[in-house]
Amino acid sequence: MSKPDKSAIEAAVARIRPYVHQTPVLTSRSLNELAGAELFFKCENFQRTGSFKMRGATNAVFSLSDEAAAKGVATHSSGNHAQALAKAAQLRGIPAYVVMPSNAPKSKIEGTKAAGGQIIFCEPTLQAREDTLAQIVAETGAEFIPPYNDYRTIAGQASCACELLQQAENLDYIIAPCGGGGLLSGTALSAHYFAPQTVVLGAEPHNANDAYRSFHAGQIIPSVNPKTIADGLRTSLGDKTFGIIREHVTDILIADEEWIVKAMRLVWERLKIVIEPSCALPLAVLLQNRREALQSKRIGLILTGGNVDLDVFFAQYEHIAGLS
Amino acid sequence: MSKPDKSAIEAAVARIRPYVHQTPVLTSRSLNELAGAELFFKCENFQRTGSFKMRGATNAVFSLSDEAAAKGVATHSSGNHAQALAKAAQLRGIPAYVVMPSNAPKSKIEGTKAAGGQIIFCEPTLQAREDTLAQIVAETGAEFIPPYNDYRTIAGQASCACELLQQAENLDYIIAPCGGGGLLSGTALSAHYFAPQTVVLGAEPHNANDAYRSFHAGQIIPSVNPKTIADGLRTSLGDKTFGIIREHVTDILIADEEWIVKAMRLVWERLKIVIEPSCALPLAVLLQNRREALQSKRIGLILTGGNVDLDVFFAQYEHIAGLS
């Protein structure tokens, strides 16, 4: 598959429709006042398996021929892509082999198992993940579905902005977080094809600003051991996502850790929804940067997922209730 | 005003419509499987000021004559009713005097101030609260708007079930939490008038089971110093709410603290929304009691509010991010 054109994205939207949720768009008077703009939050935390990753995985899985699909799909992931791929495979009735580092969070392991994924643990290094995956693919003939640097995945993620553009009309901007760039590149393609007047911006932690640096340098500059609470955004761009981002994204804005935590808390308190730290980036860059051009504008913000570890929070309640 | 009849509730629905949100109803495959029933969560955590209390306060405030309203409204509350009354008064452009104990949670004080409420602090005893309120009312001529034991308030809370019954048709049951009984009695009246085939159940913490005991004894038996994490449900019934509950509620189910915490966590994890501990009661009683009669039924559960203290949770993130 080559870079998704308009019809490839339309096909992805139609292909995944029976299997994914059309997620709601929330608004908040008080957050509008804080940001000095009209904000539309696209809530992928309500998506099946708890994140937008369900879209790309479902598009990839249901794009396969019956013959290819029968051998199953495989990936390596310690995050939301693992659960999403397992669920998409379960919906098609085929096996999903998921290579996970031995130190993966318990919640992600359980989520992947609950969706029927077959987990193969490996040492927590990129080399071990890639070697183990290659071995699984060789043994089973399963199709590798990459988490972001893949045009099928990108076309699936693009469906999120397609929905948003219909739910909140005449957006001046859409801001999407950027990790590996799958969501951001898909968002940029959807705006390009379906709402060319809408400007797409990426949002990235200052402490994991490889997309920002790559964007301005004109070549991929990977992050080295990035330290940010936005754990979904520690990944670096791939060549396919970078190519689309260079062509169709207008700018990448960055936010400090302090603003990421502030923005996350504001979303929890004002919208009353559970989001991951990575989701806070679009609001964080808006509030920290206060760009003049964004004032009073209609801005879509993609909230990417809600799979957050609640152990500490509920330990507090168990303690108050005398249960621990 | 006497006990709200059908037209009084219809009038309340129409009166408050411009000022309150029609909150969404959420569903979850995985929670349905856990409960063995079809669940419809009415999300009053998304209501203005973060709880259903906005409905009753708004109905009471907008029921006043212009002459009475001009003198303002008053109440004593350390909880969601304070913020709701302040906001409703602000929307009508009249003063709200809110008596609060000096040890009220900071978040409630700030929320009430943000809504334009004038706070009068007093000693943290019921006597001091009532005395201070009486003094304010005598000085200002403001109308006292009780948090639950008031037919205007009850008629406003009834609007929540009216919406739910339209959003999720043919419900077999509605379960509402019970503290002072304003929401539960309003819910029971709405079902009685608009969906008489729908059975209404109350849900209460075992550790604050005054409604359960009162219901079975046929007379009000107040809780004495109840200890439960469901802080919104520590209040005891009033004579007006008890009268309606005796007549129109079928049963009161109770849940232990352990199940309240479990149910709260399930809602956060599966629905990805922020709810208060008190909201967890309907799901907690369902999961703990596993009543045969409720299996495979269509059940509406009212999630009452989302004003929860997030300090501990975000301290964790600030620590990880190196900000504290």
Image (cartoon, coloured by chain):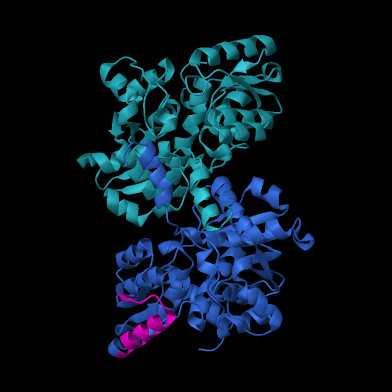
Chain colours: A blue, B cyan
The image quadrant of residue A197 is: bottom right
Which range of residues does the magenta coloring cover? A120-138
Q: Is residue A298 magenta?
A: no
Magenta span includes A133: yes
**Quarter of the picture holding the C terminus of chain A:** top left
Q: Is residue A256 above or below residue A262?
A: below
Tell me the quarter of the picture where residue B228 sits: top left
- Image position, residue A44 (x, y; %): 50, 61
In the rendered image, is residue A287 in sight?
A: yes
- Above or below residue B239? Residue A137 is below
Coordinates of residue B238 in the picture (x, y in percent):
42, 18
Does residue B36 appear to the left or right of A152 in the view shown? left
Q: Taking A52 as reference, is B88 left or right?
A: right
Q: How far from the left and from the top, in percent, is residue A2?
A: 54, 89
- What is the quadrant of residue A300 in the picture? bottom right
Residue placed furthest toward the left: B292
Judged left or right of residue B166, residue B110 is right
Rendered position, B220 above or below B278: above
The x, y position of residue A304, in whole percent, is 52, 63
Res A17 visible: no
**Residue found at x 37% / y 61%:** A107
Q: Main secondary structure of the magenta part?
A: helix
Q: B301 or B223, which lies in front?
A: B223
As drawn, the residue found furthest toward the right would be A292
Q: Residue at x 52, y 49 (%)?
A: B314
